[in-house]
Amino acid sequence: MDWAPSVENLVRELSHLPGVGRRSAQRLAHHLLRCPEEQARALATSIANARDVVRSCSRCGNYAEDEFCPLCADPRRERGIVLVVEKPADISAFESSGRFRGGYHVLGALLSPLDGIGPDRLNLPALRRRLDSGEVRELVLGTPASTEGDATALYLQRLVPPGVAVTRLARGLPVGGELEYSDSLTVLRAFEGRIPA
């Protein structure tokens, strides 16, 4: 390219973002270099700040700045129903429906032996503590309808103690689809149509 090395470096780093190819990264880089300086610096500061203060919620694994995320800290949430998802972004899909008032549990990954992801890489110790506390009445398996999602759901079913109902989301979500990209109505129908696992 005929660009300065720092511009090329910015394009390369932006192209590492999910869903951003080289052309989109170029457009973003040009925008950041043309926008008012305070806007670009505010973006850089917010990224650095989030990286410094955001951590995993000690109860569910969602993004948090304190020990508990805002959802776990909310006393109005129904703690007896826990919806297990792969990543924090999946929570947004359910929260946008406005109907689910239970708790969440973020696994952080899905079982994938080919990629070297076994049970030791999932956020299972915190889930076991929640299940052993006797507080959970229903565990809703919200893993995607994929080979890895189904394998993870099957593995989780074996961890659940007697007396805790285990359900799966209805198959209203497309096979291989990501919760993060599903519309709120599809997510709501999948949740309301959940079935025993």
Image (cartoon, grey):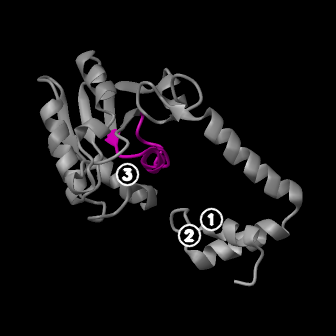
Q: Which residues are magenta?
A: 84-101
The alpha-carbon separation of the residues under discs 3 and 2 comes to 28 Å
Up/down of 98 relative to 147, above or below: above
On the picture, is 111 further left or further right than 104? left
- Label 1, on which residue? 14
* Foreground label between 3 and 1: 1
x%, y% of residue 9? Answer: 68, 67
Label 3 belongs to which residue? 188
Farthest residue toward the top?
Answer: 133
The secondary element bearing badge 1 is classed as helix
Q: Quadrant of the N terminus?
A: bottom right
Q: Is residue 82 magenta?
A: no
Task: Judge left or right: residue 62 versus residue 80.
Answer: right
Real-space Cα distance between discs 3 and 1?
33 Å
- View extreme (front): residue: 5
* Badge 3 amino acid: Leu
Pointer 2: what residue?
20
Residue 64 picture location, percent across and down: 55, 32
Secondary structure beneath dot 2 equals loop
> CB of mark 2 within 8 Å of CB of mark 1?
yes
Question: Height in image: 196 above or below 58?
Answer: below
Please give the label number shown on residue 141: none
The image quadrant of residue 179 is: bottom left
